[in-house]
Each structure stands twice: as C-alpha cells, then as structure tokens.
C-alpha cells in the first residue's frame, strides 16, 4: 500500500519537478562560478526556449572567458536577431570582433550602431574607451569618431580621442584643433594639454611644447617629479601610444 501511495505521489509531482527544472537553467547558469558549467546551463535554457535573449547574452560572456571569441560573436548575433534595438549586444559584438582582428570597419559599424541606439545615454559615452591606438587603424578610427560627433556634437571625450587619432596619423593641424576644442570645454583636461605638448614637440616648436608641459605640471603637481611623476600619473588610468609615451618621458627628463 505504501509503495502504491509513493508511486502515485511521484507521478503527481513529476510534471511539477520537470517544469521547475525547465525554468531554472538560466538561474543555475547565472549563479554558477565555472564558465564551462555556465555555458552548459545557458545552453539548456536556450534549448528549453526560456530567457532566450539573456541566455544568449550571458553564454556569450562565458564563451569569452573561455577564449571562444567566435562563439561569443555568434551568440551576440543571436541577441541582435531577437532584439535589434539592444545597444549592449551591438557594442559587445563589436568589441569581440575587434579583439580577433575581424574587418575593423565591421567592428566600428557595431559600435556606431550602439551609439545610434543609445543616443545621449551617459553610459554610451564610456564605450569610446575600447579603441586601442596601438593596435587599430587610425584612419578608420578618425572616420568613426567624426561620425560619432554628429551624434554628440559637443563632447570633450570625442575631441580628445580624435586629437590623439590625428596625432598618431601625423595630421598635426587637426590634432591641434581637436585638443583645443577639448580644452575649450574643460581647460584642465590634462591628457588634452599633454596632447598639445606632443603636437608642438613633433613640429619642433619646443617653446610652446615646454609652455604646455609647464601648464600640465600646474594642473597635475605630481608631474613636477619628472619621469617618476609621469609614471605615477599613468597609474591613475592614463595611457599613451608607445611613441607618445617615450616622447613624454624624454620631455619630463629634459625639462624638469
């Protein structure tokens, strides 16, 4: 009798237990710590057709941690198929594309699409930081940032980054214009001031190069310590191309 009762109870609970399992895979993946387990759980969530967008997006992140960049790109593409107005999916796919050297313009197109969707969302401004001047095509970046300026006509972060793009490509007059635009918006923008210093130095205008360097030291007193101060300054999150970094070290060494 007891066996029959237990059997009946199990048969009654089985559909409930299965339903619970079917709807729990995303949560299991979300709280799992092992990326391989995360991928397994998010895949099961996708197979069950639950939390599709979130499951693809999170699985992409887990794949990135496992160095499966193309797999992540495929998952972000699935997210975009599900919701073509999600800025996060576009910017994540763009970053992934750039990291494995996919056609640079494809990566730019994704990031630009994210900006078009996000418009003046303050979070979107932060996306500019993913572009690496040491690795990327400067001319492609210049095209990209000028397009972004149409969305954000007066933005100091765009002017500053354009300044460094033009500096890296040797277009000093445009670099000068953009650094000055940036400083007009924020007179103590230290990396823009150092950008002006570099423009003048590369043009052999040493008088103005030293003038801007002295201005930078007033804004950031730690720079008065020369090369050691410059190294300490960079630990605050500032970075430069290899060429600009070495040039600034020479200036901080010579003009103490």
Image: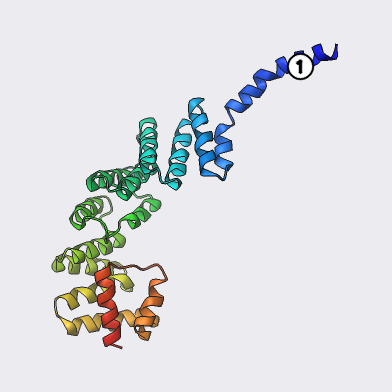
For the residue pair 98 and 224, the one nearer the viewer reads as 98
Quadrant (top left/top right/bottom left/bottom right) for the N terminus:
top right
Q: In which quarter of the image is residue 70?
A: top left
> What is the x, y in percent for residue 214?
29, 84
Quadrant (top left/top right/bottom left/bottom right) for the C terminus:
bottom left
Q: In which quarter of the image is residue 12?
A: top right
Residue at (34, 55) in percent of width and height: 130
Q: In the image, is residue 225 above or below residue 54?
A: below
Colour pattern of the rendering: rainbow
Secondary element at image label 1: helix
> What is the x, y in percent for residue 98?
30, 49
Q: In this view, does 148 lie to the left or right of 68?
A: left
> What is the x, y in percent for residue 218?
34, 82
Query: Is residue 193 among what the camera can see?
Result: no
Q: In the image, is residue 180 above or below residue 129?
A: below
For the residue pair 68 and 51, the one nearer the viewer reads as 68
Q: In the image, is residue 8 above or below residue 244?
A: above
Residue at (17, 63) in percent of width and height: 169
Query: Is residue 28 among what the camera can see?
Result: yes
- Where is mark 1, residue-wise? 9
Q: In the image, is residue 133 above or below residue 104?
A: below
Q: In this view, does 230 lie to the left or right of 13?
A: left
For the residue pair 113 and 239, the one nearer the viewer reads as 239
Classify mark 1: residues with Cα within 10 Å, few (<14), some (14-19) or many (20+): few
Residue at (37, 51) in percent of width and height: 124
């Amino acid at each position: 009798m007891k066996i029959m009762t237990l059997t009946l109870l199990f048969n009654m609970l089985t559909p409930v237990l299965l339903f619970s399992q079917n709807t729990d895979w995303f949560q299991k993946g979300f709280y799992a710590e092992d990326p391989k387990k995360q991928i397994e759980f998010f895949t099961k969530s996708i197979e069950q057709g639950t939390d599709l967008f979130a499951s693809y997006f999170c699985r992409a992140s887990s794949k990135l941690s496992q160095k499966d960049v193309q797999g992540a790109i495929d998952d972000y593409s699935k997210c975009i198929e599900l919701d073509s107005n999600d800025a996060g999916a576009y910017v994540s796919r763009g970053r992934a594309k750039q990291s494995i050297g996919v056609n640079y313009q494809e990566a730019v197109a994704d990031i630009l699409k994210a900006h078009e969707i996000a418009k003046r969302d303050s979070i979107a401004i932060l996306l500019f930081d993913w572009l690496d001047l040491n690795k990327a095509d400067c001319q492609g970046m210049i095209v990209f940032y000028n397009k972004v300026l149409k969305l954000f006509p007066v933005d100091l972060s765009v002017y500053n980054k354009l300044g460094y793009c033009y500096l890296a490509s040797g277009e000093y007059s445009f670099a000068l214009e953009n650094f000055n635009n940036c400083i007009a918006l924020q007179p103590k923008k230290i990396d823009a001031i150092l950008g002006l210093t570099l423009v003048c130095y590369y043009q052999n205008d040493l008088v103005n190069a030293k003038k801007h360097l002295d201005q930078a030291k007033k804004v950031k007193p730690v720079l008065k310590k020369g090369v050691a101060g410059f190294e300490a300054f960079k630990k605050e999150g500032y970075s430069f191309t290899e060429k600009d970094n070495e040039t600034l070290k020479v200036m901080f060494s010579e003009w103490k």
